Every structure is written in structure tokens, then in C-alpha cells.
Amino acid sequence: MIKKIISGLCLLFSVVSFAQEGTSSPYSFYGIGDVRFKGTIESRSMAGIQVEQDSIHINLDNPASFSNLKLTTFTVGGTYNLTTLKNESSSEKAKRTTFDYLAVGLPMGKLGVGFGLVPYSSVGYKINSYTTEPGDVSSRDYGSGGMNKAFFAASYKLLPQLNFGASVDYNFGTIETTNLQFVNGVSTGSRELNKADLSGVNFTFGAMYQAKLAKKLTLFSSLSYRFESKLASRNTRNIATISYSSGYDYSIVQTEGDDSSRKNLTLPGELKFGLGIGESKKWLVGAQVISASKGDLENTYNAAPNVSYEKAMKYSVGGYFIPNYGAFSGYFKRVVYRAGLKYEETGLVVNSESIKDKGFSLGLGLPITGSFSNVNFGFEFGKRGTTSAGLIQENYAKFSVGLSLNDRWFVKRKYD
């Protein structure tokens, strides 16, 4: 049954990941868009903490985790995002529904492998600037697309307490941005269409270690590093003359030939380190720090004099609690309760203001009776950006749901 589910959802996800508009943030104009959270709903519900060597959940955060799996594991997740965007004088609401990840993990003794598809970044903004004065210029800007990554990871359990792993990611995607300009009182205007086709490969190495501190107390740790890598951007620019109606619907009058160029971007390197303490399958409290280099993600169509980039940092604390993992009665005794807090410096600087993201999260892991599988729910609330310096503040609420399904594959039959 799980094989049929994986086949169907892989096909669905591969189609939706190209078509979805995964963000409503005006900040997604810059770089390669909004960089998405890289982890499962279980991890997001703890603000990104995932340091325990889990045997039934996939860890997308560290490739060294796959040798911990005891069963073939399939996971998929999605999010419904409600955002209020506001400046000093007005506000607007936006909502998006997105697929977040799809992955499979296969245990092979001391070796474990995993593969999947994860959206890396999203572009999805609409900005209107209208005036009513004759001769003034009104404009509309909007963008869509983003970048996905297909990954393959492998890890080896060198010691019962120590794993090493590595992953290779193939990054690919398309970003389209459009700028429309109209002169009030004139029936024609201009359209600039930019398209960037992105592709590249990057590598990540990781390690996980745990040590017994007491009979019911264990120290967990996780370390991973993603190397800086090149990202090829094949850019196409097209200028057209347009006519438009009073509702700003437009049609093309005349178009010029495409202007093509190529630019090599640099994906930032990223170091992650996490520590946790707790009793396995009972409780865990942990903290994680992520440090990312500045990289070079400015493209020909989104360079701006008021925008720069800096080193990114993220700090998280979180954990989980299970009343009684092995309870035979009382369903809610086996439910996993999760929570976390985060503070992030995103690395984007606009009008000399560093764009920061602060939030807290809650989650529930509901076991599916008669199996090791579970349904996970996550709730995240936070604030990104500021209304200072003429910028936009985003107040968001994200509601996520995911499946973690387990099955036993490659079992040799003892009887015919």
C-alpha cells in the first residue's frame, strides 16, 4: 500500500511544485526569492530542532540521520499560510497553500539512504503603484516561480552512537518577473518580462552523535555543513509596447526580440549545530544555531541600490513531550506534543534595515493505531520585516499537516 501512495504522491508533487506560488512576500523579489524552511513538520513544530537519532521519522536537516531508520519511511507535508502585510498607513491580507516536501528513507543495516523533492525558494509578489494625476506614471510588478531541489543522501552508522552522512542536491527552477508601466492619460505603456532558468549542484556533509549521561538521560548532537556552490542563471529579457484599459488589463501591441544573458550566482554555505538533552521517546529539549555566508544571489533583473546582503543567522530552541509512548490504553498518552521559538537574521538588508524573522511554533504528532506511522500537525506564528524605513511588515500564521508512513520492505520470505 505504501508503494502505491508514494507513486501517486510523487507524480502529484512533481506537478504542483512547478505550478505553486509559494509565497506572498514582497521580499521574494530579491535574490532567488523566499528561502523556504528545510525540514519536516515535526521539526518545524520545534522551531527547526531535530537532533535526536529518530528511527521512524525522516530528518531532512542532516544527511547523517538516514542510517537511524528501522523501517522504510515515506513523508510528505504541506502548509496553509495566512499573512497580513502592512506598512505605516495600510495593510493587505494574502493566503497561500503549498506542498513543502516529499521524501523516502530506506534502511539497509548500518547504511541508510534517502531521496526526495523539496522546494528551496519561492517567488510570489504583486505590487501596485497607481496615481490619478495626468502625466504621472503608474506601475504594476509581479513575480512567480522559484527553485526546487531533488536530493539523494546516504549515511553510515560507524558506531552505535555515531553516524556520518552526505547528500547531493540538484537545484532547478524558473523565476518570472513582470513590470508594467502606464502614463496616466495615455492609452499605451510598456511591459518588461524577465525570466531566469536556474540550475546547479551542491553538497552537504553531516554527523550525529549521542551519549548516555544517565540511565534515563541522553545527550544528542547534530552537525552539518553545506558547501558554497555555483548556480547558473540563464536570463531572458523581453520588452513590449502594450495598450491597456481602465481596469489595467493589457494586450501586447508590439514586442522586441529576446535579450539573453547568463550569470553565475553563488548559493551560500551553511553551518548547522544542534544540541539536545532528554529521554528518548519521552521528552527532549534542544537548541540549534545556523550560520550562513553572504553568497551572491543578486541577478541582472533585481539589482537595487537600496538592497544588500549580509551573513544570515538563526537561533532556535524547542522540544517535545510524550506522556507514555508505549501505553496500551489512552490514545492521547501516545500523542507527541511539540513547541519551539526562533529568531532569524535572514541576510537581506533593505533601506539599511536588516530583515528579521521572529516566531513560535506548536505541534501535535498523532499516532496511527496499529502501526508506527503518524499524522503531524504544526502551527507557526510570527513576524518578519518592519514598518520602519518605508518597509513592509509581515505577520503570518502557518498551519501545516504531514504524513509519516512506515513499512517493512525487502523482507526475505521464509516460506513459499
Image (cartoon, rainbow, N blue to C red):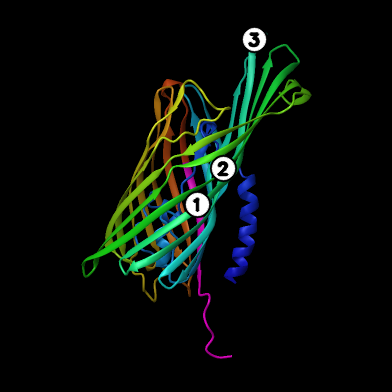
Q: Residue furthest right?
A: 253
Q: Residues within 10 Å of mark 1 (few under 14, many from 20)?
A: many
Answer yes or no: do the residues labelled 1 and 3 have beta carbons within 8 Å? no
Q: Gap in Å between the C-alphas at discs 3 and 2?
A: 35 Å
Callout 2 amino acid: Gly
* Residue 405 in magenta stretch: yes
Query: Judging from the image, what secondary structure is the residue with disc 3 in?
Result: loop
The quadrant of the rendering that contains the C terminus is bottom right
Q: CA distance from mark 1 to mark 3?
A: 45 Å
Residue 385 vs residue 52, the one in the foreground:
52
Give me the residue at 49% from left, 28% from top: 86
Foreground tag (2 vs 1): 2
Residue highlighted by disc 3: 133
Q: Residue furthest left?
A: 214
Q: Earlier in the sequence, mark 2 or mark 1?
A: 2
Residue located beneath label 1 in the image? 400
Residue displayed at 36% across by 73% down? 326
Amino acid type at image mark 3: Glu
Magenta stretch?
A: 397-416
Q: From this view, report whether residue 69 is shown above or below residue 176.
A: below
